[in-house]
Each structure stands twice: as C-alpha cells, then as structure tokens.
Image (spheres, helix red, strand yellow):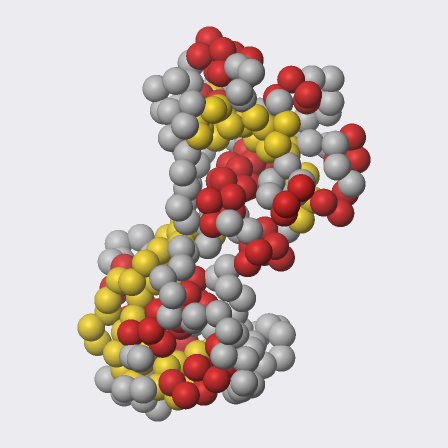
Amino acid sequence: MTDIYADTPIPFSGDILDYAENERSPEQLQALIGKTSARAVLLFKGRIGIGDGGRPHRLHPSDLIGHDLMAPGPIFLGLEGERPIFAFSIAKPESFLPEENFVSLRGIGGNMRPTDLALAGRAKSLFAWHHLEKHCVTCGGQTVARDGGVKQKCTGCGAESFPRVNPVAIMLVTDGDRVLLGRGPGWPEGFMSALAGFISPGESLEGAAEREVTEEVGLKTKNPRYVFSQPWPFPAQLMIGLMLEAVTTDITIDPKELEDARWFTRDEVLAVFEKRGQAFMCPPRQTIAHQLLRHWLAETA
Ligand SMILES: [Zn+2]
C-alpha cells in the first residue's frame, strides 16, 4: 500500500524552468531556438503530446519547420539548465504522434511527474491566453506576442499586457475529527471535494475563504490557515489551499453552488484513501483537494 502520509510534491507545482526573462529579445530567441540542445514540446487543442515512458514528447524546434502552427507560434517556456525549452501548438497532430498520444492534463495528471505537469501546464496556460485574448483591453486593437510569448503588445496604442493568473481559494473546513466536503451540480455521483471560489477584487485570501464557506454552506469559520498552493492550468488558476475551523456546524446549502455538502469523519476519509471505504469518491491525486485531504490526514494522525 502506498504511504498516504508520505511527503509528495504537489502536482503541477515544482516548475524547474528558469524563465530567462532577460534573454527574450528577437535576436536572443533566434539564437536559443537554433541551439542544438533546444527542445520543443507539442500541444494540440490544449492537450500535451506524450512520448516514450509517459513523458512529454520532445523534439528539436527545427523539426517543426514547414508545419502548420497555431498562434502565436513557438512559445519560449524557459531554460532547463542550459537547455532552451519551447512549446508549439500544432494544427495536425498526426504529423508527429498518433492523435491519441495527445492527452488532457486533467486525465493524465496523476500519472505524470509534477515537474513535467508544471511544464505542460505552463505551456497550456500560455497558449490558452493567446487564444482567448487577441485584443487590447485599452483600445481594442490587435495584439501581437512578444518576448517569446510571455507578453503581448498592442499594434494600436502600444500597451503591453501580461498573462493573467486567477487566484482561487480552496478550503477544507474541519470540526474536530470531521471535515466538510461538497459536490457541485452535475458532478459524478458520489464525488465530493473541498469548497472553492474565486477571490474578488478588494478581498484578502482569508476573507474570500470565509465568505465562500458562508455563501456555499452557511457556516461560520475561524482561524483560516494557508497550507500550500497549486497552479491549475484550466485555463490559468492559482489554487490556494487553506484549512479553516468551523464555529457553527449546521449546513445550509446554496443550491446554485452545491448539490450536496456533508461532514465526514477522519475514519471515513482514511478508509477512502486506503481504498477500503466508499463514503465518497475522492478527487484524483493531481488535484489540490486530494492533497489537502491527505495533508489533513497526516496532520491528525
Ligand atoms: Zn491598444
């Protein structure tokens, strides 16, 4: 049996790249992409191309010459040691790999190394940004990618824009040896997870966590405590994990947000993790909700 208390890295975190912010002029990028050691990873419709050994397939950027590429062309993800790593979003997967080798990061996440996931997630988020935001928020003009795809510049007014990361508070509320989990409308039967919500302008992380819990399940809480965070590239969230203690325990569900919410005992959660109980279906390993539950089990062991 795997040790559920073992200190495992948080999936999607642990990015090992040096983003090389000062090596992104057109001349520098041209030199980097031409280096023999340079490598490219491939995306198709936001899915990552997987090669031998279940790791992202890598080839030399020059192998992409002449192939149809999605905007904005190659994105320079950063340096892995001395090795420049680029990402390409391709139009025709079968030129490189069978289409089924391009897999969703949601699906494969739990089986990939956190560092590979982090790299693939960075690529996915950056391509999603260029796909979703093609116009300047100031004047509506067309934007073009700059600095190897980590910046956009407006062709009208010259304003620069940067990829946005959206902070989300994700909370485990505890009451002694019980923990609160909820399920959103339309989730798979039996699936329960931590409560979560976007942080609003003007709000602190702690304030957002307490507000979301009150809105979703009608509980008052205290002592919000940061645990760890996780980049979540769907398309570009930062999930910020907290633990809170319940002050009140009677649940009143907001049906617009949740279909169900219940208290589970530590024994019930442990039994689910040890695959000998079925009180609920646990979020998969690549989610921060799973890691928060694991953390709580370890803390209360
Ligand atoms: Zn503009």
Dividing the picture into quarters, in which one does residue 7 lie? Answer: bottom left
- Give 36 or 259, whichever is nearer the viewer: 36
Which residue is outermost to the bottom?
Answer: 250
Q: In the drawing, does residue 202 fall left or right of residue 74? A: left
Q: Position of residue 88 (x, y in %)?
A: 61, 30
Q: Residue at x 53, y 86 (%)?
A: 277
Rendered view: 231 above or below 27: below
Dividing the picture into quarters, in which one does residue 229 lie? Answer: bottom left
- Give 91 or 163, whichever is nearer the viewer: 91
Q: Position of residue 161 (x, y in %)?
A: 41, 30
Q: In the drawing, does residue 48 fall left or right of residue 194? A: right
Q: Position of residue 106 (x, y in %)?
A: 58, 56
Q: Residue at x 29, y 71 (%)?
A: 243
Rendered view: 123 above or below 31: below
Q: Residue at x 50, y 59 (%)?
A: 286
Which residue is outermost to the top?
Answer: 27
Q: Position of residue 124 (x, y in %)?
A: 55, 41
Rendered view: 200 above or below 17: below
Say if residue 227 shows up in the picture.
yes
Q: In the drawing, does residue 71 fall left or right of residue 148? A: right
Q: Can you say which quadrant of the picture contains the C terminus?
A: bottom left
Q: Residue at x 78, y 30 (%)?
A: 95
